[in-house]
Amino acid sequence: MSKPRLIVSRQIPPDVVARIHEEYDCPYTGADMDADTLIRAVTDHRADALMITSHLPFRRDVIDRLPGHIRIVATCSVGTDHIEIPAAKARGLPMTNTPDVLTECTADLAFMLMLNAFRRGYEYDRVMREGWRVHYGLGEMMGRRASGKTLGLVGYGRIGQAMARRARGFGMKILYTARNRAAPEVEEGATYFSDLRAMLPHCDALSLHAPGGAATAKVMNAETFGLLPKGAVFVNAARGSLVDEAALIAALQSGHLYGAGLDVFNNEPEYDTRFAALPNTFLAPHMGSATVETRNAMGFRALDNIAAVLEGKAPIDPIWS
Ligand code: DGY
């Protein structure tokens, strides 16, 4: 029996490629496809399925041009803000994402960003690479203590809750704001605020864990950064679109914010390089899920979704229903 035909729009881990070659007829090159290349590849290969990532804006203009033989599109990401879901729904095109499997590693990275912001991780690393040769006085190069502080979370879904679990291990008090209050067993003592603005003045650190998209665009702006206490630390491993970056840079330059740890930006990869000039800012190039274990699990989860739909079953992780 011939194998189902698959197109993959971007480079993926070797273990996932190996499984694809076992199960699919796929002319995988690892090339980063733009929309036109992708439509051509899918059409020429008469593909049954397509695997994409969050790097490709998957809007109506792309979805409407997909040939009818495509039966499923699986994005290798938990985020779906790159996808125009109503357009997929209008076409009746099953689309899936990869929730759960990246929760722990994304929270690990967010926690790493937070600790580096509190403890001047970038500056310490720079001193060493520049050849540290003088003792610092006990009053020099001091960071801020993270343990025992109050952490505010914007969004209390899977990744927000995983961040809270880590913070509890550091004796931190947890506050959160989300559309709905979580059940007591999920809150585990965290304090709910229905209003972001009411929570901000109580946060020593603030970490974003909400999805991107119109509803959350620039929730952190000059006004909301101003509501954080002076000396707060800011962390974003969610989406750059949640932040007014000019306001963030101003708050870091003025010292209103003590530091920031940032993994995501408004314009990736052409991020605003003014961030690179800020010594109190620890930066990463959108790597929340970037471990071998998690990237493999994401690829396998996408393949499981594709297999389910091609076998006539319901998708495991549908992004619309
Ligand atoms: C996700 O899965 O949404 C990550 O941010 C990678 O895009």
Image (cartoon, grey):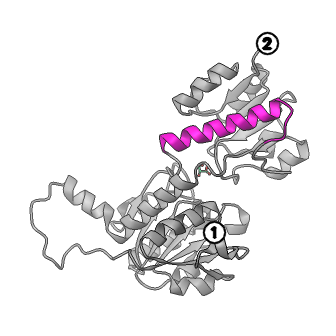
Q: Secondary structure at mark 2?
A: loop
Please say if the residues under marks 2 and 1 sit with CB atoms less than 8 Å apart.
no
- The picture quadrant where one finds residue 213 is bottom right
Q: Amino acid at mark 1?
A: Tyr
Q: Nearer the viewer, residue 120 or 145?
A: 145
In this view, 197 is above or below 116:
below
Q: Examine the residues drawn in magenta and state their main secondary structure.
A: helix
**Residue at image point 73% right, 32% down:** 50
Q: Amino acid at mark 2?
A: Met
Which residue appears at 58% of the width and 27% of the height? 17
Position of residue 138 measured from the top left corner of the image (x, y, whole percent): 15, 77
Expressed as whole percent of the image width and height from the top left, the position of residue 25 reads: 70, 18
Residue 235, position in %: x, y?
49, 67
Sequence-wise, the earlier of marks 2 and 1 is: 2
Number of numbered callouts drawn: 2
- On screen, residue 224 above or below 209: below
Percent of width and height locating residue 267: 56, 54
Q: Which residue is mark 1?
A: 156
Badge 1 element: loop
The residue that appears at 54% across and 51% down in the rendered structure is: 268
Judge whether 194 appears above or below 165 on screen. Answer: below
Farthest residue to the left: give it. Answer: 134
Residue 146 is one of the magenta-drawn residues: no
Q: Is residue 317 left or right of residue 261?
A: right
Q: Quadrant of residue 2?
A: top right
Seen in the image, is 132 located left or right of residue 149? left
Q: Which numbered tag is attached to residue 1? A: 2
Q: Which residues are magenta?
A: 291-315
The magenta stretch spans residue 307: yes
Classed neighbour count for the residue bearing mark 2: other residues with Cα under 10 Å, few (<14), some (14–19), many (≥20): few
Position of 73 with respect to 27 (left or right) is: right
Asked whether 61 or 210 is in front, the reply is 210
